[in-house]
Amino acid sequence: MLDVCHLRKEYNDLEAVKDISFSLGPGDIFGFIGSNGAGKTTTIRMIATLLEPTAGTAVLNGVDVREDPMAIRRMLGYMPDFFGLYDDVKVYEYLDFFASLYEVPARRRPGVIHDCLTMTNLSGKRDAFVQSLSRGMQQRLCLARCLVHDPSLLLLDEPASGLDPRARAELKELILELGKSGKIIIVSSHILPELADFCNTVGIIEKGELLAFGPVDEVVRNHRPARILEIKLIDRAPGAARLLAKMTGVLDAQAAGEDEVRMDFNGDLQAQAELVRALVADGYQMLGLKEDHADLEDVFLKLTKGAVN
Amino acid sequence: MKPADPNNKKTLFAVRRPAGKNPFAGLTPASVASQTRAAATYMTKDFGPWVRKLFFTNPMKIEVIRFKGRFINVTPSAALNRTMLAMAVLSYLAITWMVWLARRDLDPVVPILIQTVLMLLVGPAAAHGTIAGERDRKSWDLLQVAPISHAEIVTGKFLSIFAMMVAAVIAFLPSVLIAWLFHVNGYGDSTQYVTASGLWRLILIEGISLASATAATTYTIYLSSRMKSANATLATAISSLVGLYLVVPLGLAALVSNGSGKVMDLLMVYHPIWAIVRIWESANDNITLPFLDKFYGLPTIGLYALLSAVFLGAATKVLKKRAGND
């Protein structure tokens, strides 16, 4: 269980993270969304014990990051957005080094490393030098490094950056698999559709403030912008747009050519049915009505202003 | 009164006494004994594993693996490194061969002087990236989130380099021993140095050589803990060592050119080459060893050992101070 309680970080007169609180349980895959400089990495680094919070704290399985950082480090795996690997060591030696850092007993290490390499699909590269690996493989090696001590919390800061589509898909699968094994996973990313695919919880942060937090569906439902309706007609779309603009729930209605009206609509289903009835009653020949579903990206764009970009 | 708990570090060393003006109030022989027993149990319980982890099972020995990977493994990308290693081995064999050829004329101090100069350069060269290099390649965070203390990181990295320096001393030993055993002085005496006092001098100057290189290495580790770039660390370390060992002695020599030798001896107590030469000269000049022994031998080694400990401690302190703020 991870409880982030009123976490704050100030640098001189800049408040990088403002009073962030949230809770995650085993199996939660939390997508941390925000523009560059929004405060994602700062928050993650505070949870990872790399940055000391100005105020507030985070508690992982009952251990406070400020009181016992060493105990927290034994329970977490951290993959930074930019990381370097040691040159001149082989993949196995690299993982063995980190396993020894995390006090994995020497007799268990070969088995643990074998499992991590299998899980990250790097078994064939066991004896390769780390500098000879491709970017995608290095990302996977870094993830394997995070897993050698079987942490209960994984902090993955932009894990998919620089990966090709296949490597991204593999990474997604791996994260889902790890989530199923009961780990708490925090993933920050800019690629919103991807996060929506495999995260069961999201948080949107801007200027250090957590603007939304919760299950993906709930966040989309609670924060979605006005629905976009598209009405297809045989003709006279401008006239239909003028009529619709005056109706309940219609925020804006614009004709797109002679045969289509697009409108922002925040009414309920009753009001939506009323639109159709009014158009038919006025003699408009309607071919269909389609709703553009709002997604995480729409919510993100609605909530944030991109001020920190 | 409840006995002190040896498992609780926080309360163990806390002085527990009732509030009041008398600072000794509440301190009874029984409470002091209990506190002392608990402290002793704590120390013996935790000290052993701590020492073992710090010095013997320290995972930072990866530096040695990296050294092996860089110079000994056969990979196409390591061609340049392997060439450098091959040249070093050839140079080493050539030096040993030359020492053998010149064994009758060569003073045993010469190979040790070469070894000292080389180690004063190679130690910092090996140590400059220990911490700044981790920052350069952005692998420092990965170490910082591991459950390893800063003292273990610093000590482990130092021990890796120290092991290499000991290996270098051992590598030079054949040359030193050849010169020591076969040197013939101007009177045709080949046993001048092969005495107990000659052996002691040899041990002392080997000690000074290793200790001075160790101090230079730990100084570089300290710089590496402070600086962000490995290259800047190396430049600073080499320039300060050149200043200390070359420029300062020249300046001192100019300043005290008319002074007595003892003033210079006092001022140059920090200088390994000076110390080595003075100790060895004492064999020729019939200077009694006890004076030099007290002045340049063990005290010089002790000074360097102390400096090394101070630099390692300072490096650990810098890292502790910076933790959570980088």
Image (cartoon, coloured by chain):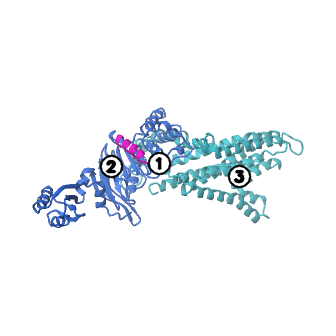
Chain colours: A blue, B cyan
Q: Nearer the viewer, residue A107 or B22?
A: A107
Q: Judge depth for marks 2 and 3 and give the one in front.
A: 2
Q: Are marks 3 and 1 on the same chain?
A: yes
> Identity of the amino acid at label 3?
Pro
Q: Mark 2 points at which residue?
A: A30
> Identity of the amino acid at label 2?
Phe
Task: Quote the CA–CA distance across marks 1 and 2.
Answer: 22 Å
The subunit carrying tag 3 is B
Residue B212 visible in the picture: no
Identify the image quadrant of residue B184: top right
Task: Quote the CA–CA distance across marks 2 and 3.
Answer: 59 Å
Q: Count numbered badges in the picture.
A: 3
Q: Residue at x 65, y 46 (%)?
A: B80
Q: Name the residue under label 1.
A: B142
Q: Name the residue under label 3.
A: B272
Residue B57, relative to residue A232: is it above or below? above
Residue B71 visible in the picture: yes
Q: Does the magenta stretch include residue A111?
A: no
Q: In this view, does A234 lie to the left or right of B80?
A: left
Q: Is residue B7 left or right of residue B94?
A: left
Q: What stretch is highlighted in magenta?
A: A164-177
Q: Nearer the viewer, residue A232 or B67?
A: A232
Q: Which of A298 and A233 is in front in this view?
A: A233
Q: Judge depth for marks 3 and 1 and give the one in front.
A: 1
